[in-house]
Image (spheres, rainbow, N blue to C red):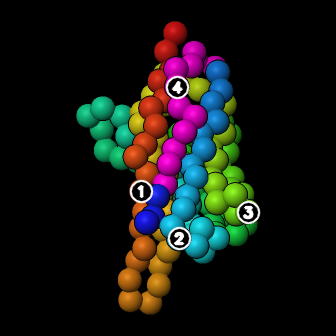
Amino acid sequence: QVQLGESGGGLVQPGGSLRLSCAASGFTFSNYAMSWYRQAPGKERELVARITSTGGSTNYADSVKGRFTISRDNSKNTVYLQMNSLKVEDTAVYYCNGRRLEFLRTYDYWGQGTQVTVSS
């Protein structure tokens, strides 16, 4: 069974930091690009950060550049999101995603999400 399990969310004050983790199982983790998405109440899901299967390249939403860092440890089947200088507008449910594009199909897996709340 394919599973992605997020952890590390919580309540933090503006300017604080959190590190999210996503542990994967049931698929060949090293073959998948991994991403973090987030969704705030009443808003659409948005891509926050993405990392290639080898960890050689990353992409970030403009709103988090310079503050968030995505990384992965393929030996542990885990992807991380280090979030620094958090802002109130970062409040959302954060979801872990794994994606692999093959010739005739796309493999796309999602976690259940973890809540991040930034409040004073």
Give the residue type that dot 1 points to: Trp
**Left or right: residue 108 compared with residue 42:** right
- Residue 79 in the image: state x and y as whole percent: 62, 53
Q: Earlier in the sequence, mark 1 or mark 2?
A: 2
Q: Would you name the residue on which mark 2 appears?
A: 27
Residue at which label 1 appears: 110
x 58%, y 73%: residue: 28
Q: Is residue 8 magenta?
A: yes
Q: Is residue 101 above or below residue 36?
A: below
95 or 63: nearer the eye?
A: 95
- Please report the bounds of the magenta region as a residue range: 4-15
Query: From mark 1 to mark 4, how far is it between C-alphas?
Result: 20 Å
Closer to the camera, 82 or 77?
A: 77
Dot placed on the residue nearer the N-terminal end, 3 or 4: 4
Query: Mark 3 belongs to which amino acid?
Result: Ser
Asked if residue 46 shows in the view, the reply is yes
Q: Mark 4 sits on what residue?
A: 10
Q: CA distance from mark 3 to mark 1?
A: 20 Å
Element marked by disc 3: loop
Looking at the rendered image, the quarter that the N terminus falls into is bottom left
Q: Amino acid at mark 4?
A: Gly
Instruction: Say which amino acid is labelled 2.
Output: Phe
Left or right: 45, with 10 as reference point: left
Instruction: Verify CB contact (< 8 Å) between mark 3 and mark 1.
Output: no
Mark closer to the observer (3, 1)? 3
